[in-house]
Image (cartoon, helix red, strand yellow):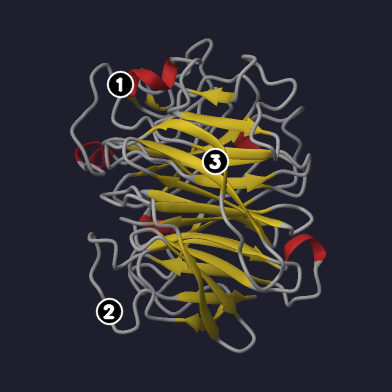
Amino acid sequence: MIRPVGRSLGLVALVTSLLVGCGGDPDPGQRANAPSATTRTGSPADDLAPGDAAGLSSEEISTGLTSPWGLAATREGTVLLSERDTGRLLRLEPATGETEALRTLPDVVPGGEAGLLGLALTPDESALLAYYTVEATSRIVSMPWDGERLGEPVVLLEGIPGGAGFHQGGRLVIGPDELLYVGTGDNGVPGSAQDTGSLSGKVLRLGLDGRPAPGNPFDNEVFSYGHRNVEGLAFDDQGRLWASEFGANAYDELNLIEAGANYGWPQVEGSGGEAGLTDPVVVWSTADASPSGLAFWDGSLWMAALRGERLWEVPLTGASASDQPSADLVEQPVGHYAGELGRLRSVLALPRDGGPGESGLLLATSNTDGRGEVRDGDDRVLLLRR
């Protein structure tokens, strides 16, 4: 069963999950703690039967993609998509199934988990922001967008440690405060996650001009720290920021992000219950998750799982974090499409900001990323409705 975790408590996992690696050797100094009774833990016991997705229907809107990664959408429902390994930016029209290549970013250097990653549209839809790796670092650029074409990229932030080929983070989301939030990975250097002067292993908060947001806790771009690899960020309907995070060998995490908080990596994987460290709200065995994209839709958080090959739904209770333990913020997670679609990379709620488009959830597979079993039509983007 999956159970919610307390703010300072970890989630319970099966003993066998401790033996399952998620893609790497144990990091020096890492400790995987047994979750407390107040933590939520996800497991295959919470999967729905194949084909039964709690009233979800699915429609393919694009096929034949190569390692799709970032998703963004206009209020009218046009979808912009990045391909990690090709450096291409595409335009998808869910209503017609039309797919159009907009441009290729020539300085993208793919390899392993690196390449062209997260996307975000500015609130006025005048620019598309993109996160990608170059030779030894990662950067964020802004490209003018007129609704039809993308202009030349302008660098907003560079020097994010990269080049290791793994633990690259890469997710972008613009909050209700119209600031840009960025998930980064530790780039294979676990200790950097605890260095508040480093951009790796963090959630960053920036203005749309790329400068550190006013009020950041460390007078730089860093908003929270102690992260291993954040590939999912989403705001819920209360304006709270959530992050999905890859663990090492025992626990993957769903965290509620707060300014200045330390999420424990590399000292703790999962929950530690230690003073000064913030524990996850939900944890999973790395075999059941290896989480990437995250979205809020229809009262739940939806988390795409790569190795776990399922879409995790984490219903929110509506409780306020200010007066409730975090165990009370979520209900038991439910797994959808277990093994049916393969590796799942990204999710995005539609319509954007109350636009006229039909409500739904975009879901992108990741079977052509070198770690999956490629199926006819892969990779694909689906539109889910309930």
Q: In the rendered view, would you say 24 is above or below 212?
A: below
Disc with the residue nearer the chain's start (3 vs 2):
3
Percent of width and height locating residue 110? 31, 52
Crowdedness near tag 1: few (<14), some (14–19) or many (≥20) residues, C-alpha within 10 Å: some
Q: Quadrant of the C terminus?
A: bottom right
Q: Quadrant of residue 166?
A: top left
Q: Using residue 103 as the reference point, say whether residue 96 is left or right of it.
A: right
Q: Residue at x 71, y 70 (%)?
A: 147
Q: In the rendered structure, which amino acid carries the disc numbered 2?
A: Arg
The residue labelled by disc 1 is 31
Q: Secondary structure at mark 2?
A: loop
Contact, mark 1 vs mark 2 (Cβ under 8 Å): no
Badge 1 or badge 3: first in the primary sequence: 1
Marks 3/2: CA distance? 29 Å
| Residue topped by disc 2 | 375
Which kind of residue does numbered mark 3 sit on? Ala
Callout in the foreground (1, 2): 2
Q: Residue at x 52, y 79 (%)?
A: 100
Q: Earlier in the sequence, mark 1 or mark 2?
A: 1
Residue 243 numbered mark, or none: 3
Q: Amino acid at mark 1?
A: Arg
Residue 375 location (% of width, % of height) = 27, 79
